[in-house]
Amino acid sequence: MAEDIKKGLLGIVVDETEVSKVMPEINSLTYRGYAAQDLCAKCKFEEVAYLILNGELPSEKQLKDFEKVERKERNLSKTLLESIKNFPKKSHPMDVARTAVSIMGLEDKETKDNSPEANLRKVMRIFAKTPVALAAFYRIRKGKKIIKPKSNLSFSENFFYMCFGRVPEKEIVKAFDVSLILYAEHSFNVSTFTARTITSSLSDIHGAITGAIASLKGPLHGGANEEVMHMMNKIKKPENALNWINNALDQKAVVMGFGHRVYKSGDSRVPTMREYFSKVAKVKKDKKFEKIYDIVEKVMIERKNIHPNVDYPTGPTYHLMGFDTDFFTPIFVISRITGWSAHILEQHAANKLIRPLASYKGNSYRKVIPINQR
Ligand code: SDX
């Protein structure tokens, strides 16, 4: 009897979750019941991080306490800092993120403790330190002095400060904050499911997040925002865009930043991110990428009925903010640590070892012939 194989687990429901859901009735991604675009309008990223991890929006006091912990944990150990200084300068920042979290796991005193309390404490350390580790590498590979985190700056302000030595205009900080809110969580995407799979054997949170970072690096997943920028740099000017995208489709290319396994008529995060992309382009007085964006989007929808996903607007937005292209997916990491962690906690709370079956297509039984007769 031919097994009903669902390659890529297409359309397969494997578990329950309370963290997020794309609600078709409002065509919105929702975190713990709140629409992501509503959270973008009314909250800062730290409030949403608290919500995803704890299940409720924080009171002012709870937010203050949360921020205090996050800011206290921003310091890196001497070992981690020295290791980053010795990483090959050509390392991809996603590999730096993955390795930094692994080193944090080597050092963390609570690695063996998978209790919710210990896991939440470890989450705060990973959440606070990963941006600092990435910013340190950002400076080192440019031959610049490392800039220490500042505890009087928000999560977003501090990342700009550690990378560039200054906090940009508030519109730029807000756009960055919005991108982190939109990137924070998206149910059983491949990196989150990777984290849950690793957790299901009762392995530790550092290992689960290390695996998730490795998965997010792939161009079919988080790595797409970097590939979007490579595409736009190849197109160079708006007047080249129409030919470029039509040629790409004629050659059956996969166009990065478009399509999605779940959203089939448009990623609900795109309108909000597109709006902030525009705001940043206005502040930077550079409309070129917006023109390329619109031409490519129009052809993708007209010719293939394939819509942009969240990686499409974030790519050029991060470029306009001044980040190196290979730092785009690491920014996705510092946000998605919250979603991954919420799922790791949830997997522990109702765990079942994840172990699917395979349909065997190999050789039928045969005897081993000793080597001197082969
Ligand atoms: C993220 O899951 C999540 O939630 C992920 C994410 C999150 O927040 O965690 O939302 C973040 O990863 C967004 C996706 C970023 N990836 C990309 O932009 C890479 C380009 N996109 C494609 O690789 C693709 O759309 C996927 C992988 C995202 C989804 O593909 P599916 O669901 O496996 O569908 P498919 O690849 O089988 O495509 C179906 C058809 C195919 O055509 P046919 O072979 O049937 O003729 O649509 C075509 C594909 O060729 N298609 C594309 C396309 N996406 C789908 N053709 C050209 N360009 C594309 N981008």
Image (cartoon, rainbow, N blue to C red):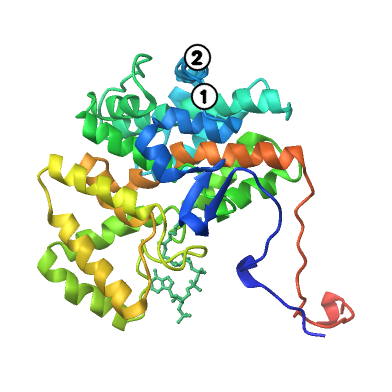
Give the amino acid at mark 2.
Lys
Are the two marked residues, 1 and 2, in contact with CB atoms closer than 8 angstroms?
yes
* Nearer to us in this view, 313 or 39: 39
Q: Which numbered disc covers residue 350?
A: none
- Where does residue 123 sit, x and y in percent of width and height? 58, 29
In the rendered view, tell whether residue 145 sits above or below residue 372. above
Which residue appears farthest toward the front when viewing the image? 25
Question: Where is residue 126 drawn, in percent x and y?
Answer: 53, 29
Badge 2: residue crowd in 10 Å (few <14, some 14–19, many ≥20): few
Kindly tell me whether residue 314 is visible in this rendering: no
Q: Please, is residue 181 above or below residue 363 in the view?
A: above
Q: Nearer the viewer, residue 211 or 25?
A: 25
Work out which residue is located at the far right of the displayed protein and give it: 367
* Location of residue 293 with respect to 214 vertically, above or below: below
The CB of the residue at mark 2 lies under 8 Å from ligand 1: no
Amino acid on which disc 1 is placed? Pro
**Residue receiving disc 1:** 58
Classify mark 1: helix, strand or loop: loop
Q: Is residue 228 left or right of residue 321?
A: right
Residue 291's quadrant in the figure?
bottom left
Residue at numbered disc 2 = 61
Q: How many angstroms separate mark 1 from mark 2 (CA)?
A: 8 Å
Measuring 59% from the left and 53% from the top, which residue is drawn there?
188
Which quadrant of the structure image shows residue 300?
bottom left
Q: Residue at x 76, y 75 (%)?
A: 359
Res 227 visible: yes
- SS state under label 2: helix
Q: Quadrant of the N terminus?
A: bottom right
User: Dot 1: within a 10 Å radius of its alpha carbon, few (fewer than 14), some, or many (20 or more) residues?
Assistant: some
Is 365 positioned to the left or the right of 253 in the image? right
